[in-house]
Image (cartoon, coloured by chain):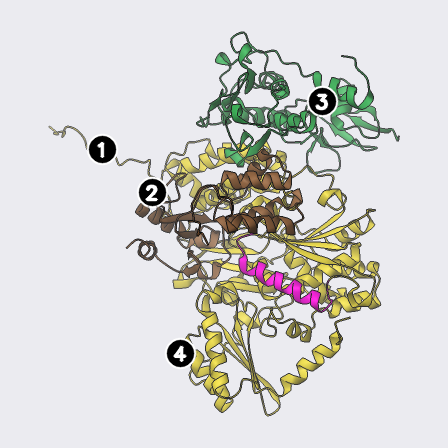
Amino acid sequence: MNAEPATATAPKGGDKRMKMLDAAMRRQQFQPDALLEVLHAAQELYGFLAPEVLLHIGRSLKVPPSRVYGVATFYNHFSLKPKGEHTCTVCMGTACYVKGSGEILEGLKKEFGLGGNRTTTQDGKVSVVVARCIGACGIAPALVFDQEMVGGLTPKAAVARARRWTP
Amino acid sequence: MTVKTLQINGKPVSAAEDQTLLDVTRENGIQLPTLCHLDGLSDVGACRLCLVEVKGSNKLLPACTTRAVEGMEVSTDSERLRRYRRQIVELLFAERNHVCAVCVANKNCELQAVALEVGMDHVGFQYQYPLTEIDASHARFVLDHARCILCTRCVRVCDEIEGAHTWDVAARGAQARVITDMAVPWGKADSCTSCGKCINVCPTGALFEKERAATGISKNKGFLTYIKNAREKKQWSR
Amino acid sequence: MTGTESLEQIAERRLEARQALRCRVSVCSGLGCESVGGQAVLEKIRARMKEEGLAEASEVYPTCCRGLCQHGPIVEVQWKEGGQPRRHLYLDVDEEQAERIALAHAREGKPAAGLASHADDPFFTRQTRIVLANAGEIDPEDIESCIAAGAYSALQKALTEMKPADVIQEITQSGLRGRGGGGYPTGLKWSTVAKEQGARKFVVCNGDEGDPGAFMDRSVLEGDPHEVLEGMALAAYAVGADQGYVYVRAEYPLAIKRLRAAIKHAERQNLLGAHIFDTGFNFRVDVRTGAGAFVCGEETALIASIEGSRGTPRPRPPYPATSGLWGHPTLINNVETLANVPAIIRNGGQWFASIGTAKSKGTKVFALAGQIKNTGLIEVPMGITLREIIYDIGGGIPEGRRFKAAQTGGPSGGCIPAQFLDLPVDYESLQQVGTIMGSGGLIVMDESSCMVDVAKFFVQFCQEESCGKCIPCRAGTVQILSILDRITRGQGELGDLDRLAELADLLRSTSLCGLGQTAPNPVVSTIRYFREEYVAHVVEHRCPAGVCSMSAVKKPAAPAVERVTP
């Protein structure tokens, strides 16, 4: 079997992920109303929403491309750019904010040279993103390192933890 | 068809079954500023300029989307409403880069007209000066984001009347921008039929024809009701 | 009908089996406890019980959030001693203690030495639990344990003994009001939808809990999803709907997973789906995921989102009750509102109305966070004072610092300063002091917080979450934020407070939806009670709490030439 290298660009024909996406759309009976559910499936399969994927979804669900784009860019959860290998999510909910998550975010951004629209390092290794309350206020300030939730870190400790990804 | 009677600014008026407060005010010569409303397109109640006071409601209601109801008591011209209208237009001028002196729509612009109508003579808010772009990739048309007020008339006319749905809105809040297809340059948007309807309905100089860039634009919005009447009532009179 | 067994038979079977158990051990499986190793603790105890040969004689199960998230993992052991039921609540349990706990109860039938029980702590005893009543009793992924605790008995009662109008009557009598923040009378909403004519009707559960700092709904969805599903089914029966949607925000993957599992289990037991309890009542529930947009907590934006569009609100009227999902009459209720329904139907509207104050009945779940000793989830009767919540239940402010303000209602709410500590917490009282009940987020602040900074934080949130459809919110939040930003950088100008007041009035009165209309609340509220703090920022370019950067204020330059006094 030919192993398709995982690329960050257009999905090629025969890519298993495309078949799974089609299956997800079929489960929703290709209803245009299911656009959000389908985008969720695509985001999960590919990690982000490439233009070709969006176009394919639009054609399959019979939704105009501008509408697909408009919906994909409205919601924070969807990313049109590939994320880094590792993601550190900083919770900026009120409870975490009053316990200093703002400083943690600044520290991480400074350490990895991120800011403005850039949330991923040049080498694609680390992304630092903000979440508006993940609901773990009991362990504020809450951070998520890939899938692992960690609470009560200082800015220094948070940076040290993230640095483990780029030894 | 139940006809209703209601009061606007103390004056008794009548309204047909599905008439909005905006329809009724216009019929009775009462002026209300509007920007997102356009006869022939669906109403979205987005610009908030046509808000009116209705007795019994503690919320202001947009005249363009509110059906006339029997016994309603509406006021359209209080001090408060006038102040809000002026402030809303001021917010628009501060939001993007509206420079009338060099604009193709100068003197033919609904934003200018509304500013005059609400008595705006200066802008009390901080100008944001966002970095905006111009898309001149289309053979005949230009989009200048600096002048866009996000009224979404272009989106609605392309969707409801032409049927191509080339336009939509991407992102949200202050980052929102109108886009074509997958946010590609307009000239590369396959779905566009170059019909020019969006040009005609745009209230400002955001959308204009290259041909008219030097001489200034003249827009013909009446075509909308003309098309609607032709399609729905089989009446072809301009 | 549930397969071969009735609801009562299942409950009986499980309760009887419990009689033969040595002990029951529940480990909190809420997000807070999971993130500090709750799963490992559970597995340790289970393994140890098995090694002691008690695999069949003990029940070790995950349960819903106990609320004291500051001290997780939390383990509770229930057993009988001399015919009397005993319980021991362990806090901050690590794997080593888990071992000891398992051993002690397995071998000696006694609590582990040296580990005190916190079951009688004021944090727990001062609460009144309706929505969170099942914590410790049920395993959310084991529907039979939920049935044994009474799940779906209210639905059975309603479908077999009551008419839809009777159900609405009980809810109306209970005085239940929307727990999502609006406080709209639930019975009235239900009867409005019930009266609408329509080919189809829908029930939507709003689980888009977007207030930063609120996690009540998440905990309920994770910990007791059947309670919510039963509430939805009762609502559907009452208003005449046959399809329901639970809209959960994407940031709650555990809640989504538990919900989906719960729906499957309920369908398998024929408690959801077609001909529920062998009646003509059909009700299907599907989960819809949000995608990170606070505005989708607004009813019409939520509807747009379920319909596959951008989550922009629509003008109201028409209200969702008349024209909602795909134009059909739609009932939208918050998670906590629906979670109260089964208890009301089981115990009667009057019972519910006997708790709380004259106009605010029942209980409210709060997410206590910020500068407070016992952060976590609590459920208290309406009318309890803020002082009781913060000091008796919350344990007070850590390190002996002074209470400054409590923020309720998230970005739509305001702050309550110390002078109102004895305020009874109910809808009307909170409104009177300039805030709202909101969905339940209660952030406690001490003198290390700057109120201007807090206002700026909330406005920034609203500005980022604004959908962009209407001008006042889209452009107005930008303006308010830029003024607050200047003030916190030391560039405040005289007149800024007036400008803020003007913008506040504009947004409140002219925005299209609740986001824009309430965005100015934190600003207005903090100016009202902490004006001197604003004045210090603007006039003296000083932040009394020492939080704001004041980066634009330069130190006075040294004189270029030294003056020599003659």
Which colour denotes chain B?
green
Q: Nearer the viewer, mark 2 or mark 4?
A: 2
| Magenta residues (range) | C250-272
Under mark 4, the amino acid is Glu
Q: Nearer the viewer, mark 1 or mark 3?
A: 3
Q: Give me the residue at 80% from left, 52% from top.
A: C194
Which colour denotes chain C?
yellow
**Discs 2, 1 touching: Cβ within 8 Å:** no
Residue C316 appears anywhere in the view:
yes
Q: Give me the residue at 75% from left, 72% from top.
A: C3
Asked which secondary structure carries label 1, the reply is loop
Under mark 3, the amino acid is Asp
Q: Is residue C251 magenta?
A: yes
User: What's the magenta bit mostly, secondary-structure-wise?
Assistant: helix
Chain drawn brown in the picture: A
Chain on which label 1 sits: C
Residue at the disc numbered 3: B39
**How far, Cα to Cα, is label 2 from label 1?**
40 Å
Under mark 1, the amino acid is Ala
| Mark 1: few/some/many CA within 10 Å (<14, 14-19, 20+) | few
Residue at the disc numbered 1: C557
| Mark 4: few/some/many CA within 10 Å (<14, 14-19, 20+) | few
| Residue C225 horizontal/vertical position (percent) | 63, 64
> Is C435 drawn above or below residue B202 in the view shown?
below
Q: Are marks 3 and 2 on the same chain?
A: no
Asked which secondary structure carries label 4, the reply is helix
Residue at the disc numbered 2: A122
| Residue C386 horizontal/vertical position (percent) | 55, 59
